[in-house]
Image (cartoon, rainbow, N blue to C red):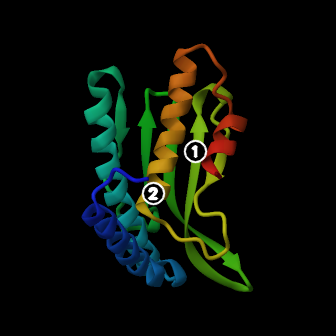
Amino acid sequence: MSLEPFADRVRALRDSWMERREVKALAGTHDFDSQFQLLSTLYSWTARAAVDVSEVYGRDLELRLSPPPSPLGRDAAFSVVVADAFVLSFRLTERQRLGTAGWFVSVSIASTGTGGNAVMAGPERRYGQWTHGRIEDLLLTMLGAYERSLSGESANGFELRARARG
């Protein structure tokens, strides 16, 4: 049984559907401008989530968010770094898909302890969409790896991959 007030649950439901509709058109269109707008939306969600992380951890954890992505030079990207050890990177990449070139948001997560080997992260399903929850899950993956590293447990790429794709 949920202890959460019903009005909060209704608000969460409405907000999640508004969010899905907001990114659905962007995620399905693979021109640079649409994908850049999607990347910018992901940046704003990541920035809000980073504030939450900073409020919980305070000075006990160094978390750096790069400046917002810029469309100049077609090298649009941003990253989040946790404790100089874990990096979550978002980048627009141009690639061939179904015989035509298009732009896509590529996301990877890496641990500097594994020599910088990155694993791909993000929606797995062919038509999966980005949500606040997916962004938060990626940040939680990095925070979990950070906490394991403090305990002397391994934070290798396999653990990152298993969590990032979950």
Name the secondary structure under disc 1: strand
Amino acid type, residue under disc 2 in the picture: Gly
* Residue displayed at 39% across by 53% down: 2
The answer to whether 7 is drawn above or below residue 156 in the figure is below
Front-most of residues 28 and 70: 28
Q: Image quarter for residue 123?
A: bottom right
Front-most of residues 47 and 67: 47
* Residue displayed at 68% across by 44% down: 161
Amino acid type, residue under disc 1 in the picture: Ile
Q: CA distance from mark 1 to mark 2?
A: 16 Å
Q: Position of residue 45 (x, y in %)?
A: 35, 58
Q: Position of residue 136 (x, y in %)?
A: 44, 50
Near mark 1 (Cα within 10 A), the count class, few <14, some 14-19 or many ≥20, is many
Front-most of residues 99 and 156: 156
* Residue wearing tag 1: 109
Q: Is residue 110 visible?
A: yes
Q: Earlier in the sequence, mark 1 or mark 2?
A: 1
Q: Position of residue 70 (x, y in %)?
A: 35, 62
The answer to whether 62 is drawn above or below residue 50 in the figure is above
* Residue displayed at 58% across by 58% down: 122
* Residue wearing tag 2: 133
